[in-house]
Image (cartoon, rainbow, N blue to C red):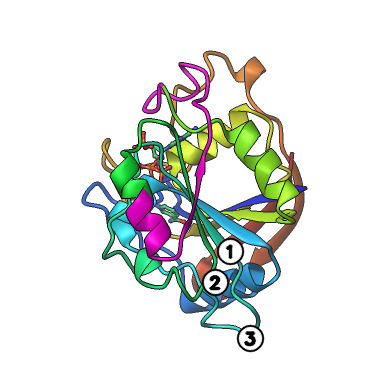
Amino acid sequence: MKVIINSAMTVDGKIATSSGDSKISSREDLVRVHKLRASVDAIVVGISTILADDPRLTVRLAKGKNPSRVIVDSRGRIPLDSQIMRTASKVKTIVAVTDQAPEEKIKKLGDMGAEVLVISEGKKGQSAAVPHGVNLKLLFRKLEKMGLKKILVEGGGELNWSLLRLWLVDELTITIAPKIAGGRLATTIVEGDGFDEIAQSIKLQLKKIERKKGGELVLYYHL
Ligand SMILES: NC(=O)c1ccc[n+]([C@@H]2O[C@H](COP(=O)([O-])OP(=O)(O)OC[C@H]3O[C@@H](n4cnc5c(N)ncnc54)[C@H](OP(=O)(O)O)[C@@H]3O)[C@@H](O)[C@H]2O)c1
C-alpha cells in the first residue's frame, strides 16, 4: 500500500482560515491535484473537512477515473444532503464509522449507495480532538484487502496527525501559497497533540521542488 498526503497551506502553515475558508491554492495546482486523484485508488478525508467544505472529491479538472472516496467519521455525522452522499450511488463511497454511529444512520447511508465499514475505535489519545476515533491501521488494512492500494489523503489537520503518528504515510506533498492567513484558531496542516520535543518529530526527505507562477511552491517529501 502507498499513502500520500496532499495539502495546500499558507506560508504560516494554515490549511483554512479561522472562519473556514480553504481556497488556498491556484487553479494550476488544483489541476495537479485532480491529475493526482485520477492516479489513485481512493481519497481519504476526515469528517470535519466534509462538514467545512462539502467537497465532491472527484476528478473534474483532468482526464481519468474517479477514485473511491473514504470518509473517516466515527459517529456517522456525514450529512445525507452532502455532495458526497448525493453522488454515492455513482461514485464509490465508503464511510468508516465506529460503533458510536447510530444504526439508523448507518442504514440510511447504505440505502443511498455508500458502503459503511464499522471499524473498532482507535486507542484513546490517538489524537487530541479524537479520543476514540476510527482505528486507522485496521481501516487501511481493510482498504488494501478491498484492492485500494494507492491512497491519497486530503486532510484535514487532525486526520493528517493521526496518520503521521501511526507511520501510515509514505509521501507528503505540500503546496505553499505565498500568503499569510494568521489566526490561532485557523486549522494547520498537522493538528493533534503534536510531539513534545523536536527530537521526536517525524523526519522528512525533500525529493523535489516545483516553483509555480505567482510564487507558489510544491514540495515533495518522502517519510
Ligand atoms: N487546504 C487544504 O489542502 C485542506 C485540505 C483538507 C481540509 N482542509 C481544511 O481543514 C479543516 C478540517 O480539518 P480538521 O483538522 O478540523 O479535521 P479533519 O481531519 O478533516 O477531521 C477530523 C475528524 O475526523 C474524525 N476522525 C475519526 N477518526 C479519526 C482519527 N483516527 N484521527 C483523526 N480524525 C478522526 C473525528 O471526528 P469524529 O470524532 O466525529 O469522527 C475528527 O474530529 C477544514 O477547515 C478544511 O477546510 C484544508
Please state which of residues 221 and 127 is positioned toward the viewer in this rendering.
Answer: 127
Answer with left or right where residue 35 lies relative to residue 82.
right
Looking at the image, which residue is at 31% across and 48% down? 105
Please state which of residues 44 and 192 is positioned toward the viewer in this rendering.
Answer: 44
Q: Nearer the viewer, mark 2 or mark 3?
A: 3
Range of residues picked out in magenta: 107-131
Dot 1 lies on which element? strand
Amino acid on which the number 2 mark rests in the picture:
Asp
The residue at the far bottom in this view is 63
Residue 219 pos. (x, y %) = 65, 55
Answer with left or right where residue 16 lies relative to residue 96.
left
Q: Is residue 18 magenta?
A: no
Can residue 77 be seen by looking at this rendering?
no
Amino acid on which the number 1 mark rests in the picture:
Ser
Residue 203 pos. (x, y %) = 71, 31
Looking at the image, which residue is at 54% across and 66% down? 92
Amino acid on which the number 3 mark rests in the picture:
Lys
Looking at the image, which residue is at 55% across and 30% down? 135
Against 101, is 216 above or below? Answer: below
Residue 63 tag number: 3
Number of other residues with Cα within 10 Å of mark 3, as a class: few under 14, some 14 to 19, many 20 or more = few
Residue 151 pos. (x, y %) = 66, 54
Q: Which residue is under mark 2?
A: 29
Specify which label sits upstream in the sequence, 1 or 3: 3
Q: How many marks overall?
A: 3
Dot 3 lies on which element? loop
Please state which of residues 134 and 223 is positioned toward the viewer in this rendering.
Answer: 134
- Please state the quadrant of the image where ligand 1 appears: top left
- Give the dominant element type of the magenta stretch: helix, strand or loop: loop
Against 201, is 67 above or below? Answer: below
- Disc 3 C-beta below 8 A from ligand 1: no
Q: Which residue is under mark 1?
A: 68
